[in-house]
Image (tube, grey):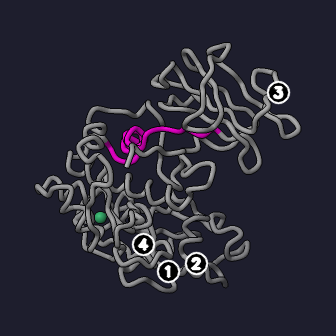
Amino acid sequence: MAAETMRIAVGPESSKVTLEGDALRVGADADEATFEPFASSSVTITSENGKLIAGGAPVPANALRFRSGPDGAGVIQVNGVRVKGDVVVLFGKTQLAAVNVLALEDYLVGVLGSEMPKSFPEEALKAQAVAARTYALNKKLEQYSQPFHLGSSVISQVYKGLDVEDPRTREAVESTRGMVLTWQLQPIEAYFHASCGGRTENGSDALGRDLPYLQAVDCPCGRLPTSHWTLDLKPADLKGMGGAKASALHVQGRSPTGRARRVEVGSRSVDAVTFRERIGYMRLKSLQFDIEKSGAGWKLQGHGFGHGAGMCQWGARVYAEKGWGFEKILQHYYPGTELQKLYE
Ligand SMILES: [Zn+2]
């Protein structure tokens, strides 16, 4: 297999896209397109009546693909984010979308620097590189005919372009090049999260994905002080969930690992995943919590950060410090999968 490329949406859709780069070239949105020199080193693209407008002039195409330098090896700044590879501007769902087309391994270096602290041990970084590569290839296969495979927000994988590149993350990506976790020869849905709090969650309870390799496993991260958190909630935080005057807040049912499945808010029963989304993913860090009444509101005490399915990053760090290699770490969090080198 040739080197894999990815198509990544850079930021949300917007009414205009600004590009900057040395020796900009422009062509059609195809890998084999001919690229002609572009008149200036920066351009703003807008749209009018369903047509693209580049630098004030209408464009006779539905998409424009830019690269920097004759061989496309230069850097392009798109809406303030510096990226490698090509940038395609096209019509998204409602407005213009900027899509970065780049080599999968370059994408992974950017993802890794955003997803895991670069100070983590080398074997944890390598495990993260394999998980992120596997996740990306799985999405690419699923989204093959779509204009892009992944967004660049926390909903898929966090990608912040070149500014988070680091020699340690590049080394972790290069030393695992082409390595992917498979189940029945297909790249798996390699979910991961910051901290599980002591036991990971099975896929069906965490994400509604009942998959053989997403099983609850023990994890040493629960002993770390960083995995514990508290959150104070006021009645106003529950507005819209249990009526304006929610007086009760209880966990109604729990998964086998102890995470909330449903939460009773006032007189209503709310799905716990929805409850976390409404409170905010950053405030209510996980579904592993207890609630006690505190004044007019409630105090939540919990542990873990994230949905809990698949690899736990803080657990991977503890295992790497204990001397585990990345293969063993991955086998622990994705039991029954195979590590395969899909391309050189
Ligand atoms: Zn953990």
146 or 215, nearer to the observer: 146
Q: In this figure, which residue is indicated by the disc labeled 2?
A: 271
Q: Secondary structure at mark 3?
A: strand
The kind of residue on which mark 4 rests is Phe
Q: In this figure, which residue is indicated by the disc labeled 3?
A: 58
Judge whether residue 112 is colored magenta. Answer: yes
Q: In this figure, which residue is indicated by the disc labeled 1?
A: 261
Q: CA distance from mark 2 to mark 4?
A: 15 Å
Q: Report whether 314 appears left or right of 296.
A: left
Q: Report whether 285 appears left or right of 16.
A: left
- Note whether residue 127 is visible: yes
The kind of residue on which mark 3 rests is Pro
Q: Residues within 10 Å of mark 3 (few under 14, many from 20)?
A: some
Does label 4 or label 3 sit earlier along the sequence?
A: 3
Q: CA distance from mark 3 to mark 2?
A: 49 Å
CB under 8 Å between discs 2 and 4:
no
Q: Regarding ligand 1, which quadrant of the image does it lie in?
A: bottom left
The picture quadrant where one finds residue 99 is top right
Question: Looking at the image, which residue is at 60% across and 25% down?
Answer: 35
CB under 8 Å between discs 2 and 1:
yes
